[in-house]
Each structure stands twice: as C-alpha cells, then as structure tokens.
Image (cartoon, helix red, strand yellow):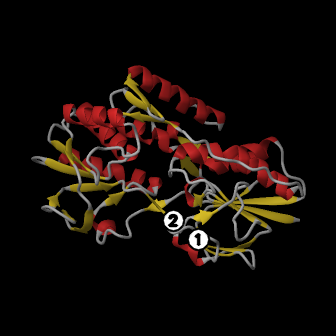
C-alpha cells in the first residue's frame, strides 16, 4: 500500500482531512504529522484575547478529524526532509517514508534578525506556545504594582488586531495600569491596506489609549529593552512580537526549490517545482503568482490541494489553481467593532464585526467545531 504524508495541520490540510473523511483514497494509507492535536484558527485568536470566545471555540480538533478520515496522527514535528529517499525525520526520532508528501506547516516567527528576541520577548507564533504563555503574562499584568508597559512589535493587521484585543480585555479586567505601545516600521499601521483605513485605525488606536511609534525598525533585544536602527531604545515590562512570517530552515536544507526567503516554490498545481511528488500550500508555500502571507490564501488553497492530492494519488492529472488577486480582510478592533478591506475599498463598524463573527463561526462549524 502506498503512503501519503500530510506534514502540518494548517488551514489547507483541514480541508484535506474533511475531504478524506467524506471519501477515502483507495490503496493509500495516510499519515498526519503535527505537533498539536488541534489547530487554532488564527482569525479568532484576537477574539479569545478580547474575551469574546472561549479557546475551545477557536480550535479545530485535528485528532478527531484524522480519526474520522482514517488518518494516523503522529503528534510530533517534522525536522528534516529527504525528497530523494522520500523520508521525513520527526522530532520524536521516527522516520516516515512516503510516496507523496503534502506540506502545510504554516510559518515560523520572523525573529532570526532580532538577536535576543527569544529569551526576552514573546513571539506570537507558534500560536500554541503563545496561548500557553498568555495566562502567566495576564497574571503578571494583573498583579503588577504601578504602570505595566506592554510593547507590541509589528504593526501589520495581526499586530494591530492583537493590540486592540488586549486593550479591550484590559478594560474588562480593570487593568487601568496597563500601557500598550504599538511599534511599526511604517508611517501608518497595516501596510498594504487602503490609506483611509490605515488612518482610521490610527485614530482609533489613539482613542483607545494605545500609543503609536512609527518608522521604528528593531535591531536587537536586551532584557526589558528594544534597540532600533534609529532613535532611542524602548523599555518594556513585556513585549509581544508580531513581525511576520519566516520559512522553516529544513525546507531550504532539504534541497526543495525555494524562493529567496526560503519558502517552498510551487507551480499552479501546488506541486514543488523541483520535486513534483511533493505539494505545499499555505504560508510555507511560495505560489507561482506571489501573494501575501495570510490565512485567507491558506484557506482558499484547501480545496485545490485536496482535489490535486486525490487526482495524483489516483493517477489523474492535477488542475491548475491561481490564488485570487484580491482578498477580503476583516480585522477586529476589540469592542465588537471591525474594519474590512477589499482592494481599494474599506468599511468599518459594529456591523463589520458581526459579519466577521458570522464568517468565522461558519468556518468552524464546517470542520466540526461549534463556536
């Protein structure tokens, strides 16, 4: 019997598991390698921080999905890949042979160029690690005497959304001593979104008491201090790092074709351009037409990935897929209020939050979690 290995429990692989549960692939045994038995839906993580959802409502049970699909779950992490011998070496010491491999591991935190970040700050990724450490940080804030300075490094959509969520949660917890500072490398937060929306977000940050520091590029960390390429250092009691996505080091080391940043290059069928028996999707992939690293594109890659894996395993030709040019961005701002962006268009208001909430809950229900 031939073997298909799914490396990673990302958004696209969730769709693959659902597809396999509905219709198994005859003649193939399938294995899922993931360090976690659940996948936290990143779109709802700020809602958990803000107090809108319990963490269970934000989690997709990978173990239950794998069981329904007849897939063997290995609760470990992939560490090294040999695409010639078709072997995946795992953190638990096991080596898995495969005939086909699909990779959807998500990104690593982009902290390699920030010396001192790991011991002195808390990256948001991996999300499970952040979730495990957030309660202790919350207790530190709650029990702290005097002002507590929390710095958010990274002012993309994820960093802005998280800053708003923490501020809202602080209001609910009466943490009046918490001072939040959002630090970005650009003049305005949320680069890549419409300027009007970015200006609106900045005004709302200021209204909520969140300090904004612009044009600040961090260079290194020391205990309680961030240093920048220009300007004075910034001190903190705690720092959360939301600086974007980095590729896992094993991808480039494996000999797979990668882009300049180390992400796996795939063609229109999501097959590796150097090793076509290997497919990749989500943030770990570098698509044939460049797209931002976003959960939106990872979710949209799920159906074509599931379809092409099935086709290749059954000896049929895979179909081309081109990621959509525009993506709908829905960004919550804490108090059941949200921003929306579609190309050059943007909106905001409580109705946008309810729209986002309905989409998020619908996505979770589709994969067996009732939010």
Instruction: State the SS at label 1.
Output: helix
Q: Residue at x 41, y 45 (%)?
A: 192
Instruction: Please identify the quadrant where the C terminus is shown.
Output: top right
Residue for point 69% across, 65% down? 272
| Residue furthest out toward the left | 146
Relative image position of residue 41 (x, y in whole percent):
52, 43
- Work out whether 269 lies above or below 356: below
Q: Secondary structure at mark 2?
A: loop
Q: Residues within 10 Å of mark 2 (few under 14, many from 20)?
A: many
Q: Residue furthest top?
A: 351
Give x and y (percent) for residue 95: 69, 75
Disc 1 packing (10 Å; few <14; some 14–19; many ≥20): many
Mark linked to residue 251: 1
Check whether the beta carbons of the residues at disc 2 and disc 1 lie within 8 A of each other.
yes
Q: Report how many numbered discs are placed on residues in the image.
A: 2
Residue 185 appears in view = yes
339 left or right of 13 in image: left
Q: Mark 2 sits on what residue?
A: 247
The image position of residue 202, as x and y in percent, is: 26, 37
Instruction: Identify which residue, 13 or 287, lies in the foreground.
Output: 287
In the drawing, what numbered circle is on residue 48?
none
Residue in front for this viewpoint, 307 or 58: 307
Q: Is residue 371 visible?
A: no
Q: Please report the residue visible at 73 percent of the width from the left and 70 percent of the height from the top.
A: 275
The answer to whether residue 24 is above or below residue 161 is: below
Q: Quadrant of residue 287?
A: bottom right
Image coordinates for residue 163, horizontal then vertical, percent: 30, 42
| Rendered image quadrant of residue 267 | bottom right
């Amino acid at each position: 019997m031939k073997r298909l290995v799914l490396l990673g429990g990302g958004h696209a692989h969730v769709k693959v598991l659902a597809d396999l549960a509905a219709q198994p692939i005859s003649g193939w045994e399938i294995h899922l390698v993931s360090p976690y038995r659940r996948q936290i839906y990143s779109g709802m993580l700020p809602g958990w921080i803000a107090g809108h959802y319990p963490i269970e409502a934000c989690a997709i049970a990978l173990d239950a999905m794998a069981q329904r699909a007849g897939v063997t779950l290995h609760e470990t992490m992939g560490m090294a890949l040999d695409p010639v011998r078709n072997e995946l070496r795992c953190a638990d010491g096991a080596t898995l042979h495969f005939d086909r491999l699909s990779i959807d591991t998500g990104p690593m935190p982009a902290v390699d160029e920030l010396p001192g970040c790991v011991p002195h700050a808390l990256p948001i990724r991996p999300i499970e690690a952040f979730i495990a450490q957030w309660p202790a940080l919350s207790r530190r804030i709650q029990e702290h005497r005097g002002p507590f300075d929390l710095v958010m490094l990274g002012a993309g959509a994820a960093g802005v959304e998280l800053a708003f969520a923490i501020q809202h949660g602080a209001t609910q917890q009466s943490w009046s001593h918490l001072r939040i500072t959002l630090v970005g490398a650009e003049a305005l937060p949320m680069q890549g979104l419409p300027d009007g929306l970015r200006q609106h977000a900045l005004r709302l940050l200021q209204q909520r008491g969140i300090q904004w520091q612009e044009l600040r590029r961090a260079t290194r960390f020391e205990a309680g201090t961030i240093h920048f390429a220009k300007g004075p250092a910034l001190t903190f009691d705690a720092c959360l790092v939301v600086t974007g996505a980095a590729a896992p080091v094993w991808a480039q080391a494996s000999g797979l074709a990668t882009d300049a940043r180390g992400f796996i290059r795939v063609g229109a069928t999501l097959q590796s351009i150097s090793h076509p028996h290997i497919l990749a999707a989500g943030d770990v992939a570098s698509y044939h037409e460049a797209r931002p690293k976003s959960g939106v594109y990872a979710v949209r890659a799920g159906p074509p990935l599931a379809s092409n894996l099935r086709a290749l395993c059954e000896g049929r030709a895979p179909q081309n897929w081109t990621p959509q040019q525009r993506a709908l961005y829905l960004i919550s701002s804490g108090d059941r209020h949200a921003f929306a962006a579609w190309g050059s268009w943007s909106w905001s208001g409580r109705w946008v939050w309810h729209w986002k909430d309905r989409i998020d809950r619908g996505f979770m229900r589709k994969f067996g979690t009732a939010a």
